């Protein structure tokens, strides 16, 4: 009987965490699909994962491919697969349009076509993003989105992948997990992968920018990798398909942009290096003013500040939009509201970033 769960992006930020939790909490066998251009690259990645999952020997197998390739899943026996978690994606806000299309849209369709061949398929989980809602303001329900315009190609590609599922593959036993931005690995604030949020905090800590795009009251939806992975694992076990879950806080549980900046500067203020420089809080500016800054920095291609601002700029428009994320489906399915305390996570994350100088130094917790 088929009892294999296929996880694409099995060595990625969330894919690896989902795999670990499924191994610890279920008796399922896993097939981890890794992105690799050739056998040598695959074996290097496999060795790293095998070391982490060594105690589960016999329950984990590995394969590889590339979502931009013609047939990335041809090496997998469809009859053995009963569950699929599609975690493979490019998640950078500053991803270019071509890469977003080839990986997040066309790559997802290749996975969905493979899923159609899995005769014993019971559940298909597609990892998406809260920001598949694009520029939509107001209530953000756990339902399909209409095209409201997008701040960047990452958002539009996630929306397009969802729409592809609804329009061409709705007959599959699907469920969608729209996940908020991960600010930390866990509630202790550990950070193993930096994104636009961490780059912005770095600019503020070193006093490299004095302005910030956005409205002070804009809610910020931030979660931990552990919370997201745990939610996906639990939601993959609940009955019923054709459901969308927002793996995120509600608005009233989230920090506003100004509350976030206030907390960040309180934590930074406990650091002697930061205090000595007397760096003021940033001024909030409109989109036009921030774009002027971004354009001016373009003349210094390759500079540290320019690279950091480049990672923030594609997300800047979202900092002006008030979204009211709803997560009733999440709470109903899990029987509780599992979202971690946003303030505590942000505080712990900032302390970790300061201690490690954004990963350049080893963490030394007293």
Image (tube, grey):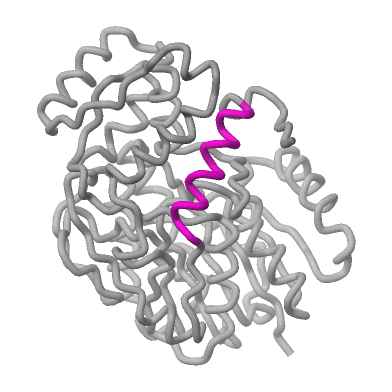
Q: Residue at x 51, y 75 (%)?
A: 115
Quadrant of the image occupied by residue 290: top left
Whether residue 343 is in magenta: the answer is yes
Q: Which residues are magenta?
A: 341-356
Q: Residue at x 65, y 81 (%)?
A: 79
Q: Residue at x 59, y 68 (%)?
A: 230
42 or 5, which lies in front? 5
Q: On the rendered structure, is 133 left or right of 346? A: left
Whether residue 354 is in magenta: the answer is yes
Question: Which quarter of the image is occupied by the N terminus?
Answer: bottom right
Question: Which quarter of the image is occupied by the C terminus?
Answer: top right
45 or 340, which lies in front? 340
x, y percent for residue 6 = 63, 69
Up/down of 69 relative to 323, above or below:
above
148 or 327, which lies in front? 327
Q: Could one spot residue 167 in this view of the protein?
A: no
Q: On the rendered structure, is 172 left or right of 101? A: right
244 or 215, which lies in front? 215
x, y percent for residue 242 = 38, 84
The dominant secondary structure in magenta is: helix
């Amino acid at each position: 009987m088929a009892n294999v769960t296929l996880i694409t992006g099995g060595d990625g930020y969330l894919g690896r965490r989902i795999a670990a939790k499924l191994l610890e909490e279920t008796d399922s066998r896993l097939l981890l699909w890794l992105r690799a251009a050739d056998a040598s690259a695959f074996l290097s990645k496999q060795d790293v994962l095998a070391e982490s999952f060594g105690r589960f020997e016999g329950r984990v197998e590995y394969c590889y491919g590339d979502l931009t390739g013609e047939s990335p899943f041809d090496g997998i026996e469809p009859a053995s697969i009963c569950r699929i978690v599609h975690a493979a994606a490019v998640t950078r806000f500053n991803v270019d349009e071509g890469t977003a299309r080839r990986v997040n849209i066309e790559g997802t369709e290749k996975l969905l076509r493979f899923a159609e061949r899995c005769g014993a398929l019971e559940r298909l989980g597609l990892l998406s993003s809260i920001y598949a809602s694009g520029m939509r303001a107001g209530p953000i329900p756990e339902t399909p989105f209409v095209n409201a315009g997008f701040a960047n190609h990452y958002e539009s590609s996630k929306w397009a992948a969802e729409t592809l599922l609804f329009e061409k593959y709705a007959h599959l036993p699907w469920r969608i997990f729209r996940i908020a931005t991960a600010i930390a690995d866990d509630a202790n604030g550990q950070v193993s992968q930096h994104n636009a949020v961490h780059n912005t905090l770095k600019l503020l800590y070193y006093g490299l920018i004095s302005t910030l795009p956005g409205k002070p009251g804009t809610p910020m939806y931030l979660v931990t990798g552990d919370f997201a992975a745990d939610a996906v694992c639990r939601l993959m076990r609940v009955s019923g398909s054709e459901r969308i879950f927002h793996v995120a806080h509600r608005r009233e549980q989230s920090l506003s942009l100004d509350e976030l900046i206030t907390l960040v500067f309180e934590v930074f203020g406990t650091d002697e290096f930061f205090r000595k420089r007397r760096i003021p809080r940033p001024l909030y500016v409109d989109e036009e003013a921030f774009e002027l800054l971004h354009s001016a920095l373009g003349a210094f291609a390759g500079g540290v500040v320019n690279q950091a601002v480049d990672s923030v700029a594609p997300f800047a428009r979202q900092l002006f939009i008030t979204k009211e994320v709803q997560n009733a489906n999440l709470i109903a399915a899990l029987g509780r509201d599992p979202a971690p305390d946003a303030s505590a996570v942000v505080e712990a994350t900032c302390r970790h970033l300061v201690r490690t100088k954004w990963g350049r130094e080893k963490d030394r917790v007293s």
